[in-house]
Image: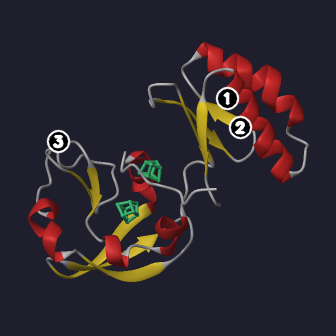
């Protein structure tokens, strides 16, 4: 299994946005953040290298509803501007347990937990529902081996992450 690689797509930080509340500002780059879903309240500091980006508060760098510390770079990549002091929920969050790739290496599916597949590819959907889900009661190792071999036979690769 591989270590989970975050692609900085920003989806989780956008959807978590309404639960992240800036409750106090000590200075421009030093704040108190409350995480409503966990009740965690903590001091956070904007990373020195992201200070200019943090001060951008209009689209496309920032949009209302996002986590107050999320910003989008000109390249389109998302940045947590308090990365080294971010809350525990963000440090431990993992959006998927497996990614599925086609022969060109493009991601065609993402799995959460054991059975929940997100894909726009009808062939991957059919393979998952017909040839993998019925085996989801196997032990962890056998199930993962089954996933790998079924996907490989059908021309797909996968990366499975430690959780
Ligand atoms: S954890 Fe997942 S959803 Fe969140 S930014 Fe990384 S890849 Fe995107
Ligand atoms: S604190 Fe950082 S990692 Fe957590 S939701 Fe906000 S931008 Fe994302």
Label at residue 148: 2
Q: Nearer the viewer, mark 3 or mark 1?
A: 1
Of marks 3 and 1, which one's residue comes earlier in the chain?
3
Of marks 3 and 2, which one's residue comes earlier in the chain?
3
Q: CA distance from mark 3 to mark 1?
A: 39 Å
Picture residue at 63% right of the left edge, 40% below the top: 111
Tag 3–tag 1 contact (CB < 8 Å):
no
Q: Secondary structure at mark 2?
A: helix
Quadrant for the N terminus in the image: bottom right
Q: Is residue 120 above or below residue 31?
A: above
Q: Which residue is mark 3?
A: 60
Q: CA distance from mark 2 to mark 1?
A: 6 Å
Q: Is residue 6 above or below residue 74?
A: below
Label at residue 152: 1
Picture residue at 37% right of the left edge, 66% below the top: 21
Picture residue at 44% right of the left edge, 25% below the top: 104
Q: Is residue 55 left or right of residue 76?
A: left
Tag 3–tag 2 contact (CB < 8 Å):
no
Q: Nearer the viewer, mark 3 or mark 2?
A: 2
Q: CA distance from mark 3 to mark 2?
A: 39 Å
Picture residue at 8% right of the left edge, 64% below the top: 52
Q: How many marks?
A: 3
Residue toward you, 1 or 68: 1
Would you identify the image quadrant in which residue 143 lies?
A: top right
Mark 2 Cα-neighbour bin, 10 Å: few <14, some 14–19, many ≥20: some
Q: Is mark 2 within 8 Å of ligand 1?
A: no
Quadrant for the C terminus in the image: bottom right
Q: Position of residue 133 (x, y in %)?
A: 81, 31
């Amino acid at each position: 299994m591989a270590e989970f690689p975050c692609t900085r797509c920003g989806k989780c930080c956008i959807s978590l946005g309404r639960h992240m509340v800036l409750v106090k500002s000590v200075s421009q780059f030093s704040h108190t953040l409350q995480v409503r879903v966990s009740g965690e309240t903590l001091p956070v500091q904007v990373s020195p290298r992201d200070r200019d980006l943090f001060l951008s508060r209009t689209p496309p760098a920032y949009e209302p509803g996002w986590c107050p510390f999320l910003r989008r770079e000109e390249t389109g990549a998302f940045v947590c501007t308090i990365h080294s002091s971010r809350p525990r929920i963000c440090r431990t969050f993992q959006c998927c347990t497996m990614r599925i790739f086609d022969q060109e290496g493009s991601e065609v599916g993402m799995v959460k937990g054991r059975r929940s597949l997100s894909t726009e590819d009808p062939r991957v959907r059919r393979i998952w529902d017909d040839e993998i889900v019925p085996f989801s009661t196997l032990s962890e190792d056998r199930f993962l081996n089954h996933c790998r071999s079924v996907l490989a036979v059908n021309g797909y690769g996968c990366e499975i992450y430690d959780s």
